[in-house]
Image (tube, rainbow, N blue to C red):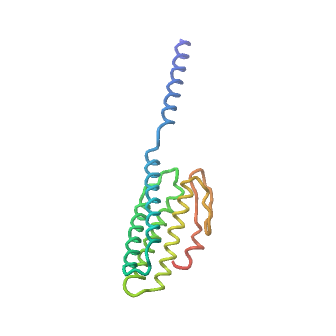
Amino acid sequence: MKKFFRKSFCLGLVFVFIFMAVGCGKKNDKLEAYKTEMSEFYDKLSQLGDSIDAIDPNSEGSKEELLGYLDEMNDIYQKMGQCEVPDEFSGVSEITVEAAEYMQKANECYHLAYDGEFDEENEQLASQYYERANNRAMVILQVLHGEVPSGEGVSVTTEDAYQLSTIDSEDSDSSTE
């Protein structure tokens, strides 16, 4: 009887180790999908930034061209803000939504500034929202790369292994909200 329990125990241990080994090699599909989505977001963001930089401000259609690129940029920010953030990066889930909201506001203000008569006040406001959206995108990128976010107006409080509270919103939000 003792031999039976010893064999059963050893056999049970073997199965446990096999299941653990198989489980360790399994990829987290949600994590991989998120990394892919974010990689595509940053690639497209970079392309749009280059396109905006290449606009000739003296050309006749420069305003329309700029607004078109900003519309595209807003679209990718909105998609990024709707991505399901896996537990491994849950510390940036609020920041992704904030970035999308700020880009939406920036896009709206840029349209108010450049559609029709130029409106300097809306252009300045749009620029502030645009900067906030991009600052948050940079914080997200730092976290995705395993770095501790840094920069002006960024404070990090480690709550546990996966939770980060970032970007001190009091300093950067006071002038326009």
Q: Position of residue 168 (x, y in %)?
A: 59, 68
**As drawn, 76 above or below 84:** below
The quarter of the displayed image where residue 63 is located: bottom left
**As drawn, 101 above or below 22:** below
Is residue 82 or residue 129 the one in the foreground?
129
Q: Position of residue 162 (x, y in %)?
A: 56, 52
**As drawn, 114 above or below 154:** below
- Residue at 46% x, 56% y: name it: 38
- Residue at 37% x, 72% y: name it: 68
Q: Position of residue 98 (x, y in %)?
A: 49, 66
- Residue at 41% x, 71% y: name it: 70
Q: Position of residue 173 (x, y in %)?
A: 55, 74
- Residue at 52% x, 72% y: name it: 131
The residue sitting at the bottom extreme is: 117
Is residue 52 or residue 116 the one in the foreground?
52
How many numbered marks appear? 0
Is residue 126 or residue 87 the one in the foreground?
126
